[in-house]
Image (cartoon, coloured by chain):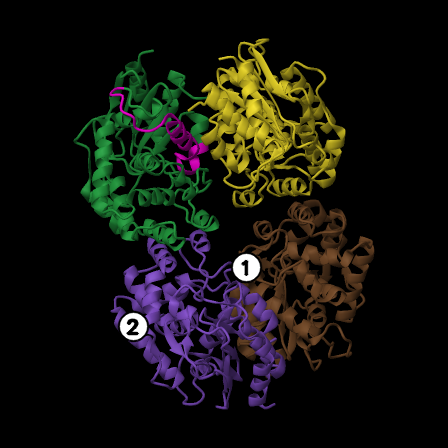
Chain colours: A green, B purple, C brown, D yellow
Amino acid sequence: MDLTDILATVHRDMQAHLGRGRVADYIPALARVDPKHFGIALITCHGQHAAAGDSAIPFSIQSVSKLFTLTLALEKHGGKLWKRVGHESSGSSFNSIVQLEQEQGIPRNPLINAGALVVTDALLESGAPANLITHITAFMQQLADDPSISVDPEVATSEGETGFRNASLANFLRAYNNLHSPVADVLQVYFNQCALRMNCRQLARAGLFLANAGIDPLNHTHITTPMRARRLNALMMTCGHYDASGDVAFRVGLPGKSGVGGGILAIAPGRASIAVWSPGLNPAGNSLVGQMALERLAALTGWSVF
Amino acid sequence: MDLTDILATVHRDMQAHLGRGRVADYIPALARVDPKHFGIALITCHGQHAAAGDSAIPFSIQSVSKLFTLTLALEKHGGKLWKRVGHESSGSSFNSIVQLEQEQGIPRNPLINAGALVVTDALLESGAPANLITHITAFMQQLADDPSISVDPEVATSEGETGFRNASLANFLRAYNNLHSPVADVLQVYFNQCALRMNCRQLARAGLFLANAGIDPLNHTHITTPMRARRLNALMMTCGHYDASGDVAFRVGLPGKSGVGGGILAIAPGRASIAVWSPGLNPAGNSLVGQMALERLAALTGWSVF
Amino acid sequence: MDLTDILATVHRDMQAHLGRGRVADYIPALARVDPKHFGIALITCHGQHAAAGDSAIPFSIQSVSKLFTLTLALEKHGGKLWKRVGHESSGSSFNSIVQLEQEQGIPRNPLINAGALVVTDALLESGAPANLITHITAFMQQLADDPSISVDPEVATSEGETGFRNASLANFLRAYNNLHSPVADVLQVYFNQCALRMNCRQLARAGLFLANAGIDPLNHTHITTPMRARRLNALMMTCGHYDASGDVAFRVGLPGKSGVGGGILAIAPGRASIAVWSPGLNPAGNSLVGQMALERLAALTGWSVF
Amino acid sequence: MDLTDILATVHRDMQAHLGRGRVADYIPALARVDPKHFGIALITCHGQHAAAGDSAIPFSIQSVSKLFTLTLALEKHGGKLWKRVGHESSGSSFNSIVQLEQEQGIPRNPLINAGALVVTDALLESGAPANLITHITAFMQQLADDPSISVDPEVATSEGETGFRNASLANFLRAYNNLHSPVADVLQVYFNQCALRMNCRQLARAGLFLANAGIDPLNHTHITTPMRARRLNALMMTCGHYDASGDVAFRVGLPGKSGVGGGILAIAPGRASIAVWSPGLNPAGNSLVGQMALERLAALTGWSVF
């Protein structure tokens, strides 16, 4: 099985679908992205690389960042974090405030917006937002082994100007005493982490520790424990694609996390880390072509965990 | 039927219940109010006054203010206001954000928090918050025929410091584009209108136009149209007591609006305006003894509209 | 004010709207009714009659029957009935099972389907369904002073054949132990009470006790107590028009109960009982033209309770 | 790694917990089961067996049966089945009717009660219930390679006498036209499939095809396609433990399906099929000790798919 050939096949098979879906348009910097982009890259636990399409063009990772802040927060707080956020799938849309009310301010899981705000707050504690943004960026640079990764300031600013729904969630969490830092500080960090720009190659590299029991297989750095790596993968499987997580488990069979920028990071445990990007979203808010590409990749590689 | 005797009877019958219920404790200025207070006052369309108990002690009118800002907003915008807020009972707790999400940012009615924020926004438009606060205060002074009525600055400040849930609602409305002014401005006005201090005599006097088809019967000032006065009463009947509105209709049979400060304004159309105050709240958030007093009053007077 | 003239005016003003709305089509006997029918009748507490349009044509009273079985159940069980069914507006559609689950099998009020099933069960206890159907029919004959009133057997049979949603509700109530008789028996009675055929004149006459504190003013029969009559009116005001009850309170200002057959019974307390019928329904399930006619009538008579 | 040793270790480690949880008590035959039972058995794709504890004592498989009727229905109807039932996790309790209403009669997935009723209906079509019960029983006998497997008639009868909630769901589905056979027929089959009695050894054997891409590895019989086997596993991972599915993915990392009889079938794809039984349930309705045992087993074997 030649992985470069497989990605080339996936790339070719997606041609007919490029441009489908709807590009996120709530901020200008996202709205003006060409919907026909498609990139894919993977890296195996043995360090083998493969890529196809626009794999070197950076995009806004958006909610994919939730996975990395969660990794940091678990290292910092351990299992106590689960007192503030659950680990069940939400069964409803990704920024729903309904469930939050019914469950008294404890978000269903850390991969929906409300949960990610709690995770960011857990990282922030009483520190300065700017320091935490620097710390998260440095973590992504370390994981991707690439010091050029940075936050897109235009996106971060735009998120702040239009992020009323996230401001609503953050205030709601604060009302339930499940946000401890000032709302504005938590939102500042959150909007910046979402505005990280990475390309598929960088993102696949950054996720590799999750395919290798928490250790970066190329430089042997401990990122998290084996148990936490497994649990992060489990969370991605059950909650990583908003309320289409079950459908992705069903069709693709790999844990993954998507973002409204059109990126998806998927993990084949023990094998590889894969990043795909295509900006058009399906109604559930996941990259339409990206999800199709992962389904095709899983079929060609047999990497489904099921 | 001597109204002074009736209020004395009501007052006496409430003695055994004074202190029941739970005083609102989310801000210090409310928490320290003595739960044993009880005051009641009424004024008829013919100008007859009666009062009993602590009818001259001022309290925070809180949500009762929603009725008066709604009156102003209807005069300003007319029926167009109903495109931004409904007029159905909510069937769930008073500051629920669930319903708001299900109904796409259109609050169920103007007497729940979300709806009142929209009403305040409709009054504010692009004006300065301080001007609107002055305008609302002047309106209450006019209605109560008492220039001493004012906002309690401690309460207004405390509301602002703890009002995360209202901040959440306001941001949520803004996310649905149903709030046009800056969130902070709307909240500033809202927290100030809730912090108006009035006693039962003033409050009963202020509501008298609602018992008299929109005209102040004592000075013949037009406050609103007969149709709007009827509709304000209808709204109070179906939505004025949060999700216990049906129970109050059932037991009391008069339109009314309650506030977490323990005040209730009730209207006997064509007859009188009644204000009652007792700080202990029942689980639905309405004055426990105040509601009992109104039930007793309705029984003694036969003023139920049913 | 000549009531016959007023009804003629209402009738004339409705001409332009006849045929609007959607006739209930879930059973053939309802689906084939001509949507252009319109009838209205009223009777005052002094025995004055007035009528216009198709006031002598019988129709299926459907949910209007809930008011009368509730009257019987209150006489039989008194206030204990309120342990099995609430008296708050539901804030959601008329046969919703959601609320029932959230509230552990206690229906929100007796005028929605779930609540009416509990009321029928409370009347049935261990008796035979046929006896109870006879009893309810006799009660309607007594109230309307007309022994010709009867159940339409075709409608009752059709309801049974298509009533899966009501069967679902009944089983659900049974699962919560809030239905004591066999599900099939309760449904049999319920489908028969809904299939009662009456015309506007009969229906207005039947409701007259509610306008007169529980006593039939023409023959001085005690039907219910003054307090219960007031409470029945309060329930109609807050819950009588499904989730448009607030809108009817707002526009009409009279307590009323509607049915999917297109009939509405409205009460002007102390004054009159009014029945209107027009088969086309609005989206909330209430007679579209019937509701308009009541709004017009209230405007012409000034009978709004507000 | 000696699997017999591992199961012995798991068995020993569970001793301290035996009797915890709450035995299902809604029917007598379940209520009287000794809560201290614990059995576990597994069989590998190479035919290796291991067992410990009460692995030969039969129990009521209850909802585990949903997995097998789903397998049959997918073979019969293929992908068309997914028009009648979804494949997303429900995010709420296992027999919730709320979600069914919000989603217009399409159950969230086939492993909750509503979805399983649709699956049974899809198998039943216009056939006789008794024939389908025979067919399902024969399928289980074939899969478990044991002709002694049978339905417990006492349990099936008791389910029918107390199954008001399932009767409610079935009528509800019928109201949305998503049940085609008579409600009573569907319920008869459903109550019988739930009443199948099997022990851990039989159940592990019956699930083995799911660990081996749809082919029984011991007799090479085609049970389902590789893709369907993967999808059945994905469904078990995201939906197999009611609203604790995410927690089981998180802690155990194996697809599984639980039943209120205390049984759980878990699949280690490519490796083995595991059945565990202990009657005490946790608040989510899954075997408390059974779930702990699977967590321990996954830790000892490293079989987590993540």
Amino acid under disc 2: Leu
Question: Which quadrant of the rendered structure holds the N terminus of chain C?
Answer: bottom right
Q: Residue B223 vs residue D131: left or right?
A: left
Q: Is residue C182 visible?
A: yes
Residue C24 is covered by the magenta coloring = no
What kind of element bears circle 1?
Answer: helix
Give the answer, above or below, for where C49 lies relative to D130: below
Amino acid under disc 1: Asp
Q: Which residues are magenta?
A: A218-246
Cα–Cα gap, marks 1 and 2: 34 Å
What kind of element bears circle 2?
Answer: helix
**Residue D143 or residue C60, whichever sits in front:** D143
Where does residue A85 sit, x and y in percent of width and height?
41, 42
Q: How would you rate the neighbour count of disc 2 (Cα within 10 Å): few for under 14, some for 14-19, many for 20 or more?
A: some
Q: Identify the residue under disc 1.
A: C243
Where does residue C2 sit, x and y in percent of width and height?
61, 82
**Residue B274 or residue C195, whichever sits in front:** B274
Question: Are the residues at dot 1 and dot 2 in contact (C-beta closer than 8 Å)?
Answer: no
Residue furthest toward the left? A148
User: Which residue sits at x=60%, y=78%?
Assistant: B296
Circle 2 chain:
B
Q: Is residue D81 visible?
A: no
Give the answer, above or below, for where A20 lies relative to D222: below
